[in-house]
Image: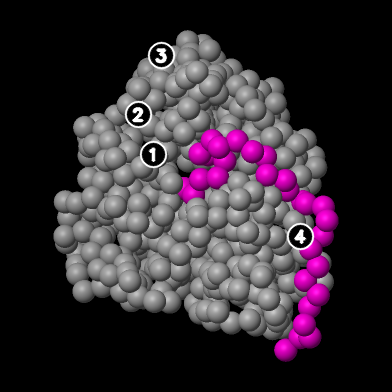
């Protein structure tokens, strides 16, 4: 065991509480992936009535809001991120009446509802795209999308060399009514997801109308899909590298390609912010901040200074901190990631929004079991080296305890409160993510993190629905992790999450200020979260040899052995001092 550390508190804070009681500054938001949450009718796919029935579970967990991934009318080429009608619900999930019931029930339980918005592209089955195909080159209908003439003697080559996120060429050629090949259209993701032309006023007006439609139905906000991609560089210049949603990690202005983080996106979001602000109720003191309608950007942008531009006071309220999600499990790396995030977001008066898992990445209970510093894989197959599940869960609990102690907002992904791992042995024939086919089976894709939730161990589909049917197969290990196996069980992952969220709310950690602690050692990340009216909360995450807490420490919670005054490797402890 290491010698007693000095636990010296610095005199200057890395992050000073920014004030303001708007809910989005400090909220804990839970992502519901509707296909995999709860199936009410036994067809093997989750639905809106299933979500509504389980809302009390989220209230009891202690979150403030739920973000629901797309439920719109869609051919489901990309699990709903290919939208055919932004103003209706796909029959797979229910009806508009079901959506209204869900929103109303959530509000009865003091839960806010954030819905997903997919503005970069539509489905190729959207009425606009079908009209564009029928209208032909040069028509106003085609100007809503990015149609271009091809290169080569007869236009047989794509307009540029862009590659799609899901693999393959980012351009698909269409034919006229007689079958003659003509123009090409851009799709940064899948051929069934044509990109909108956001320089077209019709597109901008349409999305203001879509936002208004859902605001009028009572939603509390929007999570905006690939928010950094709407505007492409003038002339669509060549970019030989395979397009990646994540940034390059350097300070270059193009952030990895001419399809990402272009200056013009900010004008769009300023108009959206103005619309959302118009819905915020006014009173004698200005407005009721508890009723704010808010937006969160999914923007894989680096460095942090560029991401902060999305959360300036007249744009987004939040932006996911993906740099934190991708930071290696090392004290120095996390110290720098957290410090730089606060430095950039504090400069524009915005909260930092922490996240560790979502529907697009390997769950952190699995990812953190991989060798430290290894690039994040896009899925894990049965033939790949299998992660150490116990190590992954141990680190995941420590990482979440670190995340939830940080000032700012936090997003949780469904099932992480159960310690769910990715399904890393899923049969290849069960995979549905378009990445699997378009990468020619070189990338497993995201199916492993999207497997249906287990609610009851000894029930069909582990309680996901009334039948054995599940749209993706569940691994056997999910049975032992089901809600009924953890509910009320001391020391379970579920009860640990509930306790963390209770303490986070009671101590108002989201609106606190952060001061780093010196003297704890190179393999220790330690800070104090201070908040007026509350005792200081000390937080330590250990990445090395065991560390002794100060003699006057009172343990509030530990991701390892409860109440121990020794912090073992891969453990986070919250404590106060006499």
Quote the CA–CA distance across marks 2 and 1. Answer: 8 Å
Q: Is residue 49 visible?
A: yes
Q: Nearer the viewer, mark 4 or mark 3?
A: 4
Which tag, 4 or 3, sits closer to the chain's start? Answer: 3
**Dividing the picture into quarters, in which one does residue 160 lie?**
top right
N-terminal label among 4 and 1: 1
Kindly identify which residue carries mark 3: 135
Nearer to us of marks 4 and 2 is 4
The image shows residue 295 at horizontal and vertical percentages of: 52, 33
- In this view, the residue in front, 479 or 502, is 502
Q: Is residue 377 magenta?
A: no
Mark 4 Cα shell of 10 Å, populated few (<14), some (14-19), many (≥20): many
Mark 2 lies on residue: 218
Q: Which residue is mark 1?
A: 113
Q: Is residue 82 left or right of residue 89?
A: right
* Residue 355, above or below 295: below
Q: Nearer the viewer, mark 4 or mark 1?
A: 4
Separation (CA) of disc 1 from disc 3: 39 Å
CA–CA distance between discs 4 and 3? 61 Å
Magenta span: 1-29
Residue 482: % across, % down:
32, 69
Q: Residue at 17% of width from left, 55% of height from top?
A: 42
């Amino acid at each position: 065991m290491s010698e007693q550390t000095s636990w010296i508190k610095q005199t200057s804070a890395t992050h000073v509480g920014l004030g303001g009681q708007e809910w989005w500054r400090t909220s804990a938001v839970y992502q519901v992936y509707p296909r995999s949450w709860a199936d009410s009718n036994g067809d093997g796919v989750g639905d809106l009535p299933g979500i509504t029935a389980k809302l009390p579970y989220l209230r009891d967990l202690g979150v403030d809001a739920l973000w629901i991934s797309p439920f719109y009318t869609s051919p489901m080429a990309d699990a709903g991120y290919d939208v055919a009608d932004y103003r209706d619900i796909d029959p797979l999930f229910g009806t508009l009446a079901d959506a209204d019931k869900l929103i109303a029930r959530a509000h009865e339980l003091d839960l806010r509802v954030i819905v997903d918005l997919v503005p970069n592209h539509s489905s190729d089955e959207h009425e606009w795209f079908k009209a564009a195909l029928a209208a032909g080159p040069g028509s106003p209908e085609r100007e809503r999308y990015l149609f271009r003439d091809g290169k080569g003697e007869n236009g047989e080559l794509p307009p540029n060399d862009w590659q799609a996120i899901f693999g393959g060429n980012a351009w698909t050629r269409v034919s006229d009514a007689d079958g003659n090949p003509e123009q090409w259209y851009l799709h940064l993701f899948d051929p069934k997801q044509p990109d909108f032309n956001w320089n077209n006023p019709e597109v901008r007006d349409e999305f203001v109308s879509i936002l208004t439609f859902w605001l009028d139905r009572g939603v509390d906000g929007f999570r905006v899909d690939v928010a950094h991609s709407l505007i492409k560089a003038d002339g669509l210049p060549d970019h030989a590298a395979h397009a990646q949603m994540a940034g390059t990690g350097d300070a270059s202005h193009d952030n990895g390609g001419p399809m990402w983080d272009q200056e013009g996106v900010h004008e769009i979001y300023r108009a959206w912010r103005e619309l959302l602000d118009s819905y915020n109720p006014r009173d004698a003191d200005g407005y009721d901040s508890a009723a704010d309608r808010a937006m969160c950007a999914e923007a894989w942008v680096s460095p942090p200074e560029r991401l902060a531009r999305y959360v300036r006071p007249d744009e987004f309220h939040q932006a996911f901190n993906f740099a934190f999600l991708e930071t290696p499990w090392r004290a120095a790396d996390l110290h720098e990631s957290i410090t730089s995030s606060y430095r950039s977001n504090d400069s524009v008066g915005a909260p930092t929004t922490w996240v560790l898992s979502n529907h697009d990445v390997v769950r952190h209970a699995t990812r953190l079991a991989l060798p430290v510093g290894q690039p994040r894989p896009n899925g894990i197959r049965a033939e790949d080296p299998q992660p150490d599940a116990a190590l992954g869960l141990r680190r995941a609990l420590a990482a979440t305890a670190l995340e939830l102690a940080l000032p700012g907002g936090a997003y949780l992904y469904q099932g992480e409160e159960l310690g769910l791992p990715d399904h890393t042995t899923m049969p290849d024939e069960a995979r549905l993510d378009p990445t699997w086919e378009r990468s020619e089976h070189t990338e497993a894709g995201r199916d492993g993190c999207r497997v249906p939730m287990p609610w009851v161990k000894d029930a069909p589909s582990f309680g996901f629905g009334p039948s054995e049917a599940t749209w993706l197969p569940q691994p056997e290990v999910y049975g032992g992790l089901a809600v009924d196996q953890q509910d009320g069980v001391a020391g379970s992952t579920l009860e640990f999450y509930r306790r963390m969220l209770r303490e986070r709310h009671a101590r108002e950690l989201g609106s606190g200020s952060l001061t780093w602690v010196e003297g704890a050692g190179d393999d220790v990340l330690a800070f104090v979260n201070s908040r007026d009216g509350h005792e200081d909360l000390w937080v330590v995450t250990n990445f090395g040899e065991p560390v002794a807490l100060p003699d006057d420490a009172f343990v509030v919670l530990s991701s390892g052995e409860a109440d121990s005054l020794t912090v073992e490797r891969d453990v986070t402890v919250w404590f106060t001092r006499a």
